[in-house]
Amino acid sequence: MSATTLHLVVPGLTGPRPIDRAPTAPALEWLLARARSHAVAADPESLLLQLFGLPVAAEVEQPVAALTRLGDGGAVDGEGWWLRADPVHLRADLHGVLLADARALAIDATEAALLAAAFDHTFATDGLQLDVPHPQRWYLRLPADPGIRTRPLAEVIGRDINALLPQGSAARRWRTLMTEVQMLFHAHPVNRAREEQQLPLLNGLWFWGGGPCPVSAQAPAAGLYARDPLARGLAHLAQAAIQPLPDDAADWRAISDDEPSSLVLLDATRYDPIDDDAPAWAARVAELERDWFAPCRQWLERGELAALHLYPGNGCCYSVSPAARWRFWRRARSLSAY
């Protein structure tokens, strides 16, 4: 294999939310200590847009809905405004109204279709119709900007939604819609059946990721490997092929022999900081250490990898070249330092 460049995107590895009790990962700590770093977007959605050459600005909502709809196999033209309308579980307690995302709901396609049909029937006069290509990802297509600014779903999981509801000139309308959806779904037979099975109710929608579909994108590497729907959508927009995720670094090396550069998105740790699940995070870091970071360190030390660009989710890119082996003064630090 000729030396190649590897972009390794690992959301949740060191952020954006901190986790205490960082595990020991010698190869990863070596890579981070000996790297040169520069600032990039911290959240996974903005980072992927940035890597694919699309503009990212804090004051502008990222068009995640249109792009993930592409990734889910839909046809998305340049007209209209797409909005994610993801199914969630809402639970009121003394701390407010807490949100759990679809990962905790085990939604099947039949449940999604029945609730979408009820939504469409109820809100047809408002010109609203749900598009449900995947049980966990639902969409609304609107004729124009709905006049709201929303918060990404990942920022709301496990938190009180009251301070995170849509803002903007049409906020009242959309907040009212969210309340009406809660009442509609709560009384639906799908949720009565879930209640009998002691499953969490699918009793709300979270709107986010609004915007029109970008016109084009540019692939950041010759080879793209991911299962993430946003990455798939961006690859489609860039007219680039995207491959299934390799099992480990050795598998990637075997299938990327003729690529001058590759981008691999490893999402195993993505939700651990959000869920504040330190044991799961530590276990997955250990797996990544064994399967990816230790092999990459060895290849860099032997000059078999031209460069590694690591994006661990903390707003930095860490770039490591074979010359890093001579930076003896760069002492390894615990992951908590990053």
Image (tube, rainbow, N blue to C red):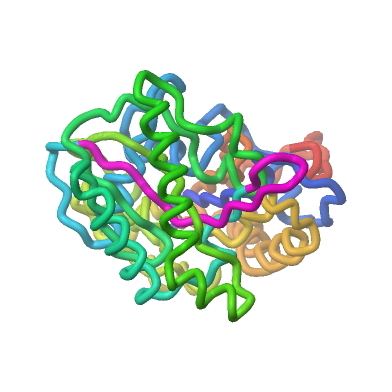
User: Visible in this render: residue 250?
Assistant: no
Q: Is residue 239 magenta?
A: no
**Most foreground residue, 73 or 198:** 198
Q: Position of residue 35 (x, y in %)?
A: 64, 38
Q: Nearer the viewer, residue 66 or 190?
A: 190
Q: Quadrant of residue 38?
A: top right
Tell me the residue at 49%/39% (across/down). 152
Q: Along the horizontal axis of the image, is 262 left or right of 164?
A: left
Name the one closer to the observer, 103 or 140.
Answer: 140
User: x%, y% of residue 321?
Assistant: 57, 43
Q: Quadrant of residue 111?
A: bottom left
Seen as rendered, the residue at the extreme right is 21
- The answer to whether residue 89 is magenta is yes
Picture residue at 51% right of the left edge, 44% below the top: 153
Q: Position of residue 186 (x, y in %)?
A: 49, 60
* Residues in magenta, as a range: 81-98
Q: Residue at x 27, y 64 (%)?
A: 117
- Place residue 302 in its image quadrant: bottom right
Could you say where residue 54 lies in the image, as x and y percent from the top left?
31, 32
